[in-house]
Image (cartoon, helix red, strand yellow):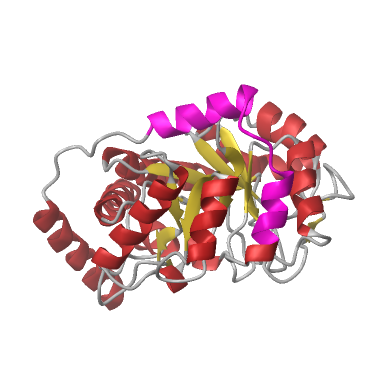
Amino acid sequence: MPKAFIAGCAGLELSASERAFFRDADPWGLILFKRNVAERDQLRALTADFRACVGRADAPVLIDQEGGRVQRLAAPEWPTYPAAGAIGSGFAPEIAEATARLTGRLIAHDLREVGVTVDCAPVLDVAEPGTHAVIGARAWSEDPARVAALGRAFAEGLLAGGVAPVIKHMPGHGRARADSHLSLPVVEASRDDLTRDFAPFRALADLPMAMTAHVVYRALDPDRPATTSPIVVETVMRGAIGFDGLIMSDDLSMKALNGPFEERARAVFAAGLDMALHCNGDPEEARAVASAAPQLAGAALRRAARALAAIRPPEPFDVERAQADLAAINARLAAA
């Protein structure tokens, strides 16, 4: 069985040392960033090489392809997609949902072409006037019901295109006033107020995968961020939200967390998460994470298998027509 972690890589192709590490450590999946992306043939070769190293043709390859400023496959090689917030604020509800679904379906087409089978999207964080720019227009709306509806439509588009979604950042990053890439946000809201943030995740709790928030919620656990809090994982994510899919951490190399990487990974699994995510491709950090990651077993193995089962052959799709529709959407948003 593979180990319960997802790793990054450093460049456009795997080095000899990375190939040896992947063969030995056997991570469940690989996550890609802009540093790993040049063009289609290169990406196909990279994803195929990873799967050959771990010996699993269905090993998931992940990426963050949301649209807006979080788009790892970017122009001019790939289409430009609107940000979630632009869709949410730019159209009436019914048109916005159709646009979100179309965006998800086209993104899935781009990803499947190059061997990527998991998209770390949609963002289900509920925006508010003080939401930090790290989320900003990545959030669909300030209305939890609208976030849920648009997130659902985007996820349906991904699934129709043979790509599994990862809802994030559970249980909600919208109240954070700091960038968790750089420091640890602390949210002082009451448990009752936080139910507004939980609502979109509860509405989409049937989806296969979720990613945590590196955020401290004082009303839930005053000492630990959600990623490493057994209280938040068990009473909120599994309990109040009712999510029984695979839960992965956000990136363990973000500065919201501290301590040696082996300890960070151990804390993730002690909290009850199924999967540790390490993104930056640093080999020493990756080895430390791998040393603390268990082999997939029990409930985590069941959830991982269910997540892979959600990756099905793409449904028939008129790509040229959809791309024309996207161009019209982008033009309308640009003129607004």
Q: Where is residue 204 in the image (x, y as percent from the top left)?
A: 50, 35
Residue drawn 32% across the image and 58% down it: 91
Residue drawn 44% across the image and 64% down it: 14
How many numbered circles are shown?
0
Viewer-proximal residue, 294 or 161? 294
Residue drawn 13% across the image and 62% down it: 324
Query: In the picture, which quadrant includes the C terminus?
Result: bottom left
Q: In this view, does 287 lie above or below 268?
A: below
Span colored in magenta: 285-310
Q: Where is residue 243 in the image (x, y as percent from the top left)?
A: 60, 30
Q: Position of residue 76 (x, y in %)?
A: 25, 77
Image-based side of 94 in relation to 141, left or right: left
Q: Position of residue 167 (x, y in %)?
A: 51, 45
| Residue 53 in view (yes/no) | yes
Residue drawn 64% across the image and 68% down it: 132
Image-based side of 35 in relation to 295, left or right: left
Is residue 27 located in the magenta-colored stretch of the structure? no
Specify the farthest residue to the right.
Answer: 223
Q: Is the magenta stretch mostly helix, strand or loop?
A: helix
Question: Which quadrant would residue 86 be assigned to in this image?
Answer: bottom left
Q: Is residue 9 above or below residue 161?
A: below
Is residue 290 located in the magenta-colored stretch of the structure? yes
